[in-house]
Image (spheres, grey):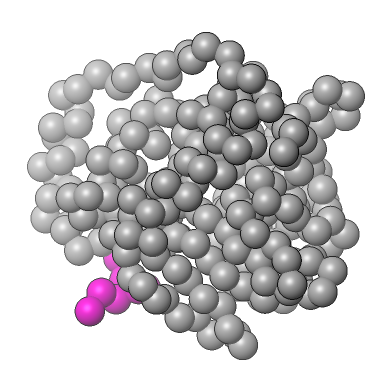
Amino acid sequence: MKNAVGTCRRVCLVALLGSLLAACAIQPTVRRPPVDPALVKGNILRLASAEWNAFGGQIVYLEGGRERIDPVGVWEDERRGSPRVAAYWRSVDENWAGYDCDKPWSAAFISWLMLESGVPPELFKPSGLHADYLRLIATNGSEPTARFVLRDARLFSPRAGDLICATRAGASIAAYNDIPDGTPMHCDLVVFNEGGRLESIGGNVRNSVSKTVRQVGPNGLLPMIGDRPWALVVELRYPD
């Protein structure tokens, strides 16, 4: 059985794959034609679900302070997983793959999701660091036409299409809208939040694109003491 908290298992392939990738030029981000804003939110949710299914539908349940994974899906360093992770990295002009297990790819996954769904890069900065696109949103969020707005996770109940973001690696931020450059963070896409149950899909969660199921209060707010130190919500303002 796979060890859900283990590291990548094909370490012996990393050096070989790295040398092959180094010989290839990084493929530039493709600039896509404009997408009808009315389609963007649906595109985001559909694509996230499709990628989760492509990775075997792995689900992480958080119950009573304990974690359970059922089923266990495809991992980043498997033949089915690594090329998909490579596609996420290409969206941020990086030439890594799933075999590069020391490279956190959750921000690349979110960036790929937004670009593929029709979000212009000037509204959502593609990056391998969550802090980069969050800082841009913090700067532009006061505009009346803003498509993304930062919200305090203690006060705002996320809805399907929103991002929930936490600090990681011991980092902290002074306020939900004050994110220092390079702050280590993780963000998931919310796909469901009703009846005290919140479901989100994220990349690089237990070595896969995973759906996480957690309990929230009756008001739908994220618990401040839980699996991650939740700091903010990115409200998606594209139409339903």
Magenta part of the protein: which range? Answer: 1-7
> As drawn, is 224 to the left or to the right of 21?
right
Q: Please give the name of the residue rendered at 15% of the width and 40% of the height, measured from the top-left corner.
A: 17
Residue 28 or residue 221, whichever sits in front: 221
What secondary structure is the magenta-colored segment mainly?
loop
Residue 183 or residue 224, whichever sits in front: 224
Q: Say whether residue 129 is visible.
A: no
Q: Quadrant of residue 91?
A: top left
Magenta-colored stretch includes residue 166: no
Q: Position of residue 24 (x, y in %)?
A: 19, 22
Q: Quadrant of the C terminus?
A: top right
> As drawn, is 17 to the left or to the right of 55?
left
Please state the total of marks drawn on the protein image. 0
Q: Position of residue 5 (x, y in %)?
A: 37, 73
Q: Position of residue 218 (x, y in %)?
A: 82, 74
Q: Quadrant of the N terminus?
A: bottom left
> As drawn, is 59 to the left or to the right of 221?
left
Q: Quadrant of residue 170?
A: bottom right
Q: Position of residue 62 (x, y in %)?
A: 56, 78
Asked if residue 179 is positioned above or below residue 220 in the image, the reply reads: above
Q: Say whether residue 75 is visible.
A: yes
Q: Please give the name of the residue rendered at 42% of the width and 19% of the height, measured from the top-left corner.
A: 29
Residue 222 or residue 104, whichever sits in front: 222
Asked if residue 22 is positioned above or below residue 17 in the image, the reply reads: above
> As drawn, is 194 to the left or to the right of 80?
right
Q: Please give the name of the residue rendered at 25% of the width and 19% of the height, measured from the top-left corner.
A: 25
Q: Quadrant of residue 208?
A: bottom left
Magenta-colored stretch includes residue 2: yes
Q: Please give the name of the residue rendered at 25% of the width and 46% of the height, measured from the top-left corner.
A: 82
Asked if residue 10 is positioned above or below residue 17 in the image, the reply reads: below
